[in-house]
């Protein structure tokens, strides 16, 4: 089920879905230095489309925009940024965790398409939402797997904000969530499930148009 939408900042769709239980989250190593098939297999879950129709609720513009001003830190460089500071760029945000094998599969699709994604001027952000992981572990993970885009660890405030905006499934990383903002910071795409390289390029090119 593909959801394209361009809500006003006062009408925030809440995507309500049953969260997945990721048992491996608390038991997996947080230093990101292992990448065994056994660890991958323990979390091989593909999200089913269990969403109910989006419900629109009125929210103050300040509440709708607050998440754009929460500071994130680039795991590789240590530089801080906010989504608001990226105004003018199309931004793709992929909630993920190092232990998640579905995330690895999706990120391999991103890697295959990254030359085209970068050429389109899109900022792709893999957002670590497991609080047991660290920016250093994310940086090592990305370097080891040859992922050249931005990785950032989500602070609690940011995770709470996207949970409130999109529903609990947005933090259930085996469902491979994806959020896309246009150059004005408006949400133009949000969905769950695998996106192949060609589909990613099409979605992001449309957002950049």
Image (cartoon, rainbow, N blue to C red):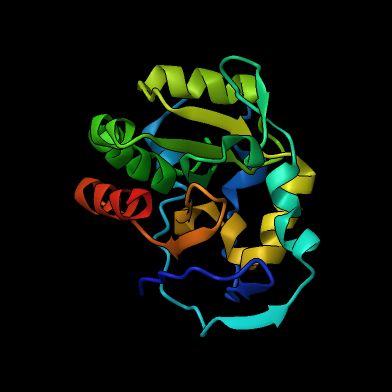
Q: Is residue 36 left or right of residue 97?
A: left
Residue at 46 percent across and 61 percent down: it is 188
Q: Is residue 80 left or right of residue 117?
A: right
Residue 63 picture location, percent across and down: 79, 61
Asked if residue 65 is positioned above or below residue 191 in the image, the reply reads above
Residue 120 picture location, percent across and down: 30, 37
- Residue sitting farthest toward the left: 198
Front-lying residue, 157 or 70: 70
**From this viewpoint, is residue 32 visible?**
no
Residue at 44 percent across and 17 percent down: it is 143
Tell me which corner region of the image, top left, top right, bottom left or bottom right, holds residue 142.
top left
Asked if residue 115 is positioned above or below residue 204 in the image, the reply reads above
Residue 113 picture location, percent across and down: 25, 37
**From this viewpoint, is residue 198 visible?**
yes
Residue at 63 percent across and 44 percent down: it is 129
- Residue sitting farthest toward the top: 77
Q: Is residue 8 left or right of residue 158?
A: left
Residue at 60 percent across and 22 percent down: it is 75
The quarter of the rendered structure image containing the N terminus is bottom left
Q: How many marks?
A: 0
């Amino acid at each position: 089920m593909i959801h394209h939408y361009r809500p006003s900042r006062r009408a925030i769709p809440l995507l309500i879905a049953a969260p997945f239980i990721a048992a491996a989250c608390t038991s997996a190593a947080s230093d990101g230095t292992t990448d065994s098939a056994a660890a991958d297999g323990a979390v091989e879950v593909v999200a089913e489309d269990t969403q109910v129709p989006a419900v629109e609720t009125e929210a103050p513009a300040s509440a709708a925009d607050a998440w754009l001003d929460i500071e994130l830190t680039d795991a590789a460089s240590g530089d801080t940024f906010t989504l608001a500071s990226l105004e003018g760029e199309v931004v793709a945000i992929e909630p993920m965790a190092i232990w998640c094998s579905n995330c690895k599969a999706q990120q391999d699709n991103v890697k295959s398409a990254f030359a085209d994604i970068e050429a389109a001027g899109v900022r792709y952000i893999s957002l670590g939402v497991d609080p047991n992981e660290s920016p250093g572990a994310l940086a090592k993970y990305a370097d080891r797997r040859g992922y050249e885009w931005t990785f950032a660890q989500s602070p609690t405030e940011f995770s709470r904000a996207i949970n409130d905006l999109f529903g609990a499934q947005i933090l259930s990383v085996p469902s491979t969530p994806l959020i896309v903002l246009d150059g004005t910071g408006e949400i133009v795409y949000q969905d769950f499930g695998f996106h192949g390289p060609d589909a990613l390029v099409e979605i992001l090119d449309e957002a950049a148009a």
